[in-house]
Amino acid sequence: MSASFTAYVLQSASTGRYYTGQTADLERRLAEHTDGLSGYTKGRGPWNLVHQEEYSTRAEAMRRERFLKSGAGREWIKNNLALREHS
């Protein structure tokens, strides 16, 4: 069985802000965000998973996470994810 890594985007239901990360275990990571065990997201939730992308290596997932956190990546999120909210 090959490993799977996920780059993901969460959106805060209370503030509308986005959080981007990557993990090898999305279910565990989402639970950590929900339970307030992650520094940045603690106290800013509840969080909803709004986007995820699967990669075969951690390096690929980390590369995508870095892009999504960049200016161009934030613009991509705004144009691709925010538009879904209004459709």
Image (cartoon, rainbow, N blue to C red):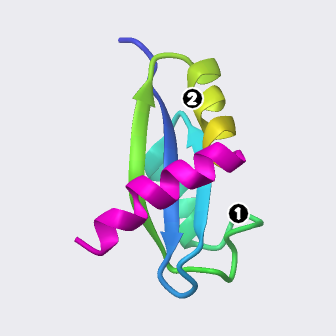
- Compared to residue 21, the image places residue 37 above or below, namely below
Packing grade of label 1 (10 A; few <14, some 14-19, many >=20) is: some
Residue type highlighted by circle 1: Ser
Q: Is residue 79 left or right of residue 12?
A: left
Query: According to the image, label 2 marks what residue?
Result: 61
Could you tell me if residue 36 is visible in this image? Answer: yes
Residue type highlighted by circle 2: Ala
Q: Residue at x 50, y 60 (%)?
A: 78
Toward the viewer: 76 or 63?
76
Identify the secondary structure beneath mark 1: loop
Q: Which residue is drawn at 41% across and 30% down?
A: 54
Toward the viewer: 18 or 84?
84
Q: Residue 38 carries which label?
A: 1
Identify the secondary structure beneath mark 2: helix
Q: Which residue is drawn at 64% across and 19% down?
A: 59
Q: Residue placed farthest to the left in the image?
A: 87
- Residue 80 on the magenta segment: yes
- Compared to residue 77, the image places residue 70 above or below, namely above
Q: Give the range drawn in magenta.
A: 70-87
- Residue 82 on the magenta segment: yes
Main SS of residues in magenta: helix
Indicate the position of residue 58 as horizontal and vertical percent values. Answer: 60, 23
Q: Quadrant of residue 65?
A: top right
Q: Is residue 66 left or right of residue 45?
A: right
